[in-house]
Image (cartoon, coloured by chain):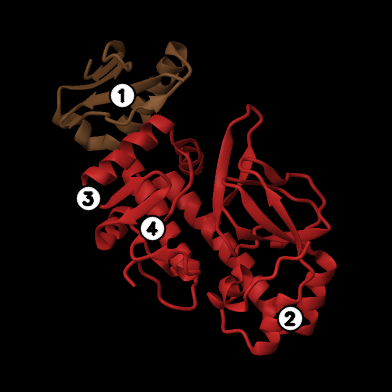
Amino acid sequence: MPRYFFHVRDSGEFTDDDGTELAGLAEVRVQAVIAAGEAIKDLGERFWRTEEWHMRVTNEAGETVCQLSFREG
Amino acid sequence: MNMPLREDAHPIIRKLESIFELSEGEKAAVLNLPLQINAIKADQDIVRESDRPSRCFAILEGFACTFKITGEGKRQISSFHIPGDLPDLQSLHLKVLDISIGTITPCTIGFIPHEAARDLCDRFPRIGSAFWRDTLIQAAVFREWVTNVGRREAYGRVAHLLCEMVVRMRAVGLVEGNTCELPMTQNELADATGMSTVHINRTLQELRADALITLKGASLTVLDWDGLKEAGDFDPTYLHLAQAPGAAA
């Protein structure tokens, strides 16, 4: 299975060096939403320390395959 | 098939001695249990929900987990099991299994006919008490896991799980220095913590980046026990071990 890397930028920067094996883009999109939800839920008040919470998923070639952002509307 | 085991190395003896001190007679009785030894490959069910077992089992080698699967097919792991554990001891008193237990790695399983286990408890009441106590501790572990999965943030949740594994493994002599086996895949860790594999992966990388642990293949090394304990809000009281545990020897 191909490996995808889920990088997050919020008040800090997380670079996913290990990546996760997933079946394909459809699965990446599902996992991105779930993982984003988990991360944002844990942030609570800390969420407001930055303007935007941003996740970028890349494939093994380093190409961006999916992006999510969450901000005050 | 019977497996000859040196008394001091017998996983069931080690497990019981983590709970109380056995007399020579009690040790001999445990060693004389008519164990049916089976080798089971990785990722196989040992027992299944709704089974009506006539025997219980001890894990002699390898790792296993207790789990349930929801109607839509999602798995929740509610406990990891290590050598010496008797994960379905409740089947002695509850006829129908309400959980499934499966191997994580290849396992050597010692099946104990219920009749033999009951006879052992009748002849050696302190062993009966230890079995009772062990099932109570299993319930305490489940309560701790509900709290952990339901209320701790991902970082603390994973740290707590790692602390528990280290303390339990140390109690049965399976930690060398600050290193022990941790053969669970990220999928299994995700199913145990109620997290996605992506988030488990991120959280493990953060614990490593904070120099609390290293994970190489199936090997976990705790670099900073106090830090990991604090991150996991970990208090080992619920494990009710005979000796006060800790990662540092």
| Residue that carries the numbered disc 4 in the rendered image | B163
| Residue that carries the numbered disc 2 in the rendered image | B29
Label 3 close to label 2 by CB (< 8 Å)? no
| Residue that carries the numbered disc 3 in the rendered image | B211
- Give the residue displayed 68% in from the left and 57% down from the top: B109
Frontmost residue, A50 versus B60: B60
Quadrant housing residue B15: bottom right
Whether marks 3 and 2 lie on the same chain: yes
- The x and y percentages for residue B193 are 46, 43
Quadrant housing residue B179: bottom left
The chain in brown: A
Q: 10 Å neighbourhood of mark 4: few (<14), some, or many (≥20)?
A: many
Q: How far apart, in angstroms, are the residues tagged by discs 4 and 1? A: 26 Å
Residue A8 relative to residue B112: left or right: left
Whether marks 2 and 4 lie on the same chain: yes
Amino acid at circle 3: Ala
| Residue that carries the numbered disc 1 in the rendered image | A6
Q: 10 Å neighbourhood of mark 3: few (<14), some, or many (≥20)?
A: some
- The x and y percentages for residue B204 are 33, 41
Q: How far apart, in angstroms, are the residues tagged by discs 1 and 2? A: 54 Å
Above/below status of B25 relative to B207: below
Residue B50 relative to residue B200: left or right: right
Q: 10 Å neighbourhood of mark 2: few (<14), some, or many (≥20)?
A: some
Mark 4 falls on what kind of element? helix
Q: Residue B95, labelled with which disc? A: none
In the rendering, what colour is chain B? red
